[in-house]
Image: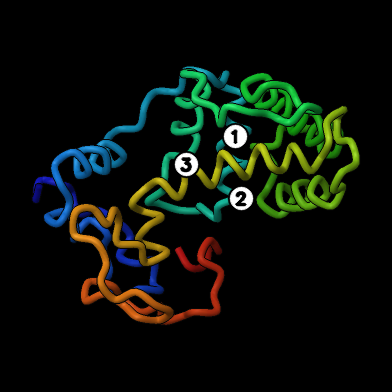
Amino acid sequence: MSSLPLETSDGGGRYPGFNTLAQADHWDRATAAVVESRLGMPPDVRFFTPGEEAAARALFDLLLGQQGEPRVPVVNMVDARLAEEQTDGWHYDNMPRDGEAWRATLAALDSEARSRTGCTFARLDPEQQAGLLQDICNLDRKLWHGLPADRVWSLWTRYACTAFYSHPLAWDEIGFAGPAYPRGYKNLGVDRLEPFEVRDVRPGADPTHGADR
């Protein structure tokens, strides 16, 4: 199992010396294979159009604070789910099905950006992008381009977080040592670390803030 490439973010600055993949020898072969597959070349984009991909990439980078490399390939991971119709198995009754909802909301994002600045969302500077997203978030349950803003926000963040936190790069940033099988944990309880865990040196910091990456 030592064939796993140890190329992660070294704890994102909050967990000095910590590397999730350093635990690979403690996983069984099936588990290691699943984790290793997430570190290979991301799947080609098949669902999103080029314009939708650009909008989605800018959206995810902002939501997840991914302003530099290495990046979790969230766009590719979400695209693969949508192309294969691997949704959550449900959707809000006042929202379209997820694939249709993604197309509609990304189109609305570009439409909103054009109405404000004359260019697409991906071409806005980060401050303008953040302002637009904050305005959508502030609408709460009001309609935004014909859809309830809180449901739109739920769609975006649900898919973004599911993809991001399934990847070892994100595990490094939150000090997660990966699958517990078959080794398990023995030091159960608040603030009781395993020998392979590292204490957070900035416990009050936001784990997804770009400055921590």
Q: Secondary structure at mark 3?
A: helix
Residue 90: x %, y % from top left: 63, 28
Residue on which the image places disc 3: 163
Q: Is residue 211 left or right of residue 20?
A: right
Left or right: where 120 falls relative to 197: right
185 and 88: which is toward the camera:
185
Find numbered disc 2 in the image and state the secondary structure of the residue it sits on. helix
Mark 2: amino acid: Leu
Residue under the point 79% across and 49% down: 137
Cα–Cα gap, marks 3 and 1: 13 Å
Q: Mark 3, mark 1: which one is toward the viewer?
A: 3
Q: Which residue is mark 2?
A: 63
Compared across the picture, whether 148 is left or right of 105 comes to right
| The quarter of the displayed image where residue 93 is located | top right
Disc marking residue 56: 1
Q: Are marks 3 and 1 in contact (CB under 8 Å)?
A: no
Specify the color scheme. Answer: rainbow
Q: Amino acid at mark 3?
A: Ala
